[in-house]
Image (cartoon, rainbow, N blue to C red):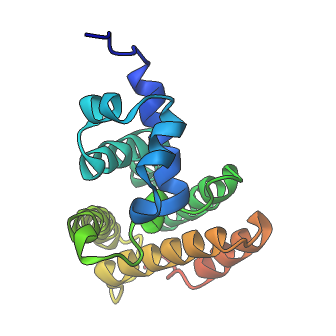
Amino acid sequence: MGRHREFDVDQALDAVMCVFWRKGFEGASYTDLTRAAGVERPALYSAFGNKEAMFRKALARYYERHLDYIPAALELKTAREVAAHILFSAVDLNTRYPDHTGCLGINGVLAGSDEAEPVRQMLIEARAAGEAQLAARFERAKREGDLPAAARPEVLAAFLLTTLHGLAVQAKAGFSREKLTAIAEQALAAWPAAG
């Protein structure tokens, strides 16, 4: 019996993550994934499980390595600073890697087949959790007088996420960093002033 080829699991996961980031869940073939990871399909299965499990691990890696700006933003003093930090960090991330622009969470399953429904639901749940964190942060800002009394934290959270998702889609479509930055600035112009 032959020996299994040894490989660096972390490097392989990073490579797999980049394939999913570039091609989405359904667009990424096993050939793409094994080629990027530099291992044979059985070794990839052994390390990560099936394609859905691989995507879950890649998404967790993406959140851990690339979305660390969100928890940092939630600690900022004002709601506007939170929104600005998230918007400009997203523009940076969406355009930082020319071979995989946009957002892994958005590119993952913007539209998918019935077989990809579990992945689509996973991404919906991840976005809902992020929206809830933002809404809670903006609710705190409202209580502290940083947002006007008429502000609707849940709507502000949805507005921010909608803008972020649009930035990711447009980055994937080829918008420049400069254009995306201008869009982020325009979104901030609509941000409510302190109460």
Residue 94: tell me if it is visible: yes
Residue at (43% x, 81% y) in the render: 159
Residue 58 lies, with reference to residue 132, above or below; the image says above
Residue at (23% x, 39% y) in the render: 49
Residue 131 lies, with reference to residue 13, above or below; the image says below
Q: Nearer the viewer, residue 139 or 33?
A: 33
Counting from the top left corner in percent of width and height, residue 89 is at: 59, 55
Residue 68: tell me if it is visible: no
- Residue that extends furthest to the bottom in the rendered view of this protein: 150
Residue at (31% x, 11% y) in the render: 2
> Which quadrant of the figure contains the N terminus?
top left
Residue at (65% x, 69% y) in the render: 171
Residue 25 lies, with reference to residue 179, above or below; the image says above
Counting from the top left corner in percent of width and height, residue 167 is at: 59, 73
> Which quadrant of the figure contains the C terminus?
bottom left
Is 132 on the left-hand or right-hand side of 163? left
